[in-house]
């Protein structure tokens, strides 16, 4: 392989890494399973999210082995008592998008807002539609509902893969 080709490949890799935007966050509404929370934190960290929020009263975080990257050391992690408190804290420049089975936006059609927080529902229920309307929620077309942590990985990957379109 010629030196020029190596140089070009290096540039592409560096460029791709720099495209991992920090302008997005993930919020979990009333998560139950700490193993899932660990998986979500790991996904968020490796895909370059700048924050993870937990919306749950009296939530106590405990690091799980699945989070091999120790994500809370690398991104902002905050717990909110309720959805209202969380939404009031989201900067105006950020779009809030729910990710829920009742969503009216099909993920393949989603053009990700540059600054966005994706809100996910609990393992045993769904997001409150009174706060996150179906028009502002994304759906992944699946036969049955997905595991919470898996869903965050799919959304993060979709965002990353579409960044080239911006
Ligand atoms: C295990 S699911 C909860 C049950 C789900 N709300 C239902 O209708 O059966 C946990 C969370 O993962 C996300 N999720 C799972 N599958 C999804 C899908 N196909 N489309 C969008 N979000 C999904 C949602 O945020 C959901 O609240």
Image (cartoon, helix red, strand yellow):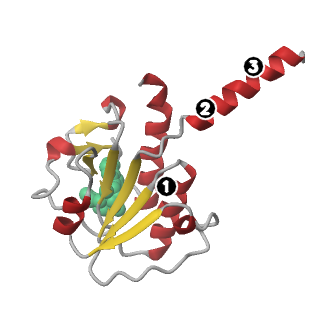
Q: Earlier in the sequence, mark 2 or mark 3?
A: 3
Q: Earlier in the sequence, mark 1 or mark 3?
A: 3
Residue furthest toward the left?
130
Viewed as shown, does residue 125 lie left or right of 5? left
Q: Quadrant of the N terminus?
A: top right
Tags 1 and 3 in contact by the CB under 8 Å rule?
Answer: no
* Residue beneath disc 1: 44
Towards the viewer: 154 or 156: 156
Q: Which residue: 40% across, 47% down? A: 24
Towards the viewer: 35 or 163: 163
Residue 144 seen in this snapshot? no
Viewed as shown, does residue 86 lie left or right of 13? left
**123 over 162 or under it: above or below:** below
**Image x and y of residue 118, in percent:** 33, 51
* Residue beneath disc 3: 8
Towards the viewer: 35 or 4: 4
Q: Which residue: 88% across, 18% down? A: 3
Marks 2/1: CA–CA distance: 17 Å
Q: Helix, strand or loop at disc 1?
A: helix
């Amino acid at each position: 392989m010629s030196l020029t080709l190596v140089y070009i490949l290096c540039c592409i890799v560096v460029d791709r890494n720099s495209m991992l935007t920090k302008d997005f966050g993930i919020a979990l509404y009333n998560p139950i399973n700490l193993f899932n929370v660990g998986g979500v934190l790991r996904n968020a960290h490796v895909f370059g999210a700048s924050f993870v929020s937990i919306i749950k009263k009296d939530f106590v975080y405990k690091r799980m082995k699945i989070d091999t990257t120790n994500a809370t050391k690398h991104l902002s992690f905050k717990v909110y008592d309720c959805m209202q408190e969380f939404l009031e804290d989201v900067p105006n420049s950020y779009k809030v998008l729910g990710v829920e089975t009742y969503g009216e936006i099909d993920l393949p059609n989603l053009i990700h807002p540059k600054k966005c927080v994706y809100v996910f529902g609990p393992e045993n229920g769904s997001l409150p539609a009174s706060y996150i309307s179906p028009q502002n929620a994304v759906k992944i077309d699946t036969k049955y509902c997905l595991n919470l942590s898996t869903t965050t990985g799919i959304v993060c990957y979709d965002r990353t893969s579409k960044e080239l379109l911006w």
